Image: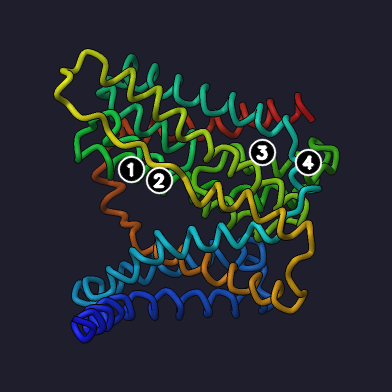
Amino acid sequence: MLLQQRLQTANRLAQLLPGLLLTLGLSLGALLLVQLPLPVVGVIGPLTLAMLMAILAGHLIGERIEKRSEAGLQFSRHYLLRAGIILYGLRISFTDLQSAGLNALLIDLVVVIGILATAAWVGIRWLKLDARTAVLIGAGSAICGAAAVLASAPTIRARQQAVPVAIATVVLFGSAAMLLYPWLFAQEWVQALFNNGDTAFGRLVGATTHEVAQVTAVAAALPAEAAHTAVVTKLMRVMLLVPVLLVLSHLFNKGQSDSNTPAKLPVPWFALVFMLLPLVNSLDLLPEQLLALLHQLDQLFLAMAMAALGFATRLSAIRAAGWKPMILGALLFALLLVGGTGMTLLLS
């Protein structure tokens, strides 16, 4: 029995290894490239660069290599992403949480409610999308990207074909946000608009960027104060996933027969653990050398997760989504940018 378990473990590791090596190589390449004096690379940061390199590699490698790498890529997208987010909590103290404040939570609440309501109204009434597809796109834009789409789909009993459509909008416009925000932060007129407030700009990034990984990618190109506020604001937003799922489950499943089993609500546990680590950081429980090592490991895990996300991005999937979901995604992206900026300036 023990031998059989060891063989199963070895087989599992062998399945993971090709994908892990692929993402590791791209991540190390991105981390090395950002050390060079290249203007564009310095702006977008190592995490976004890792994803862009993976998108290119994903369209070049053969189907056989991609199939062999899938287990490791999925492991990176799921487990390494969450491990990286958890470790990122060691960069944050209670002072950082206090700096984000109730204003960040209020902005998150307005963003989530406003984006979901707009997605449902515009998607159904104007674009004639079915309700579930419109809500999936809204959930991805409002809360935490693909994770919110995947969590919402079984809750509202969405068609399987609607899931990649919604994720395509998240990938496209979330990637646009990753490239846009570091550029905006470097503009003098934006600095003047935010009165040189790094915290306020961090709130904007965290409250309006789609994926947690995309927020951390933007944060890597921002000053420390803005980066911390962005990630904390985003994690506050992720925490709103569970109440949103409860509301969606009630709205879409009322009237169903009692024999139907309600969908299980996934709890974003990694966000909960993330919020505990500032206590460890604030109490200085870890030696400085170990803390520095964990910071490097954190950045590597996040870069590998971004590379794995890049491999999952296909231009053909975006084309197959059609123009109506893309229009809805673009409208929500514009509303996030404009409305989020207005809310941030109002509460700063």
Q: Earlier in the sequence, mark 2 or mark 4?
A: 4
Label 4 belongs to which residue? 98
- How far apart marks 1 and 3 lie (CA) works out to 25 Å
Marks 1, 4: nearer the viewer: 4
State the mark number for residue 150.
Answer: 1
Q: Position of residue 278 (x, y in %)?
A: 70, 54
- How far apart marks 4 and 3 lie (CA) works out to 16 Å
Q: Which residue shows up at 82% across the image and 42% down it?
A: 197
Q: Position of residue 10 (x, y in %)?
A: 27, 83
Label 3 belongs to which residue? 204
Q: At label 1, which amino acid type do we have? A: Leu
Marks 2, 4: nearer the viewer: 4
Do residues under tags 2 and 1 come within 8 Å of each other at their CB atoms?
yes
- How far apart marks 1 and 4 lie (CA) works out to 31 Å
Helix, strand or loop at label 4? It is helix
Q: At label 4, which amino acid type do we have? A: Gln
Q: Which residue shows up at 25% across the image and 23% down it?
A: 130
Q: Earlier in the sequence, mark 1 or mark 4?
A: 4
State the mark number for residue 147.
Answer: 2
Q: Is residue 209 above or below residue 324?
A: below
- Mark 1 is surrounded, within 10 Å at the Cα level, by few (under 14), some (14 to 19) or many (20 or more) other residues, namely some
State the mark number for residue 346.
Answer: none
Residue furthest front as drawn = 1
- How far apart marks 2 and 4 lie (CA) works out to 27 Å
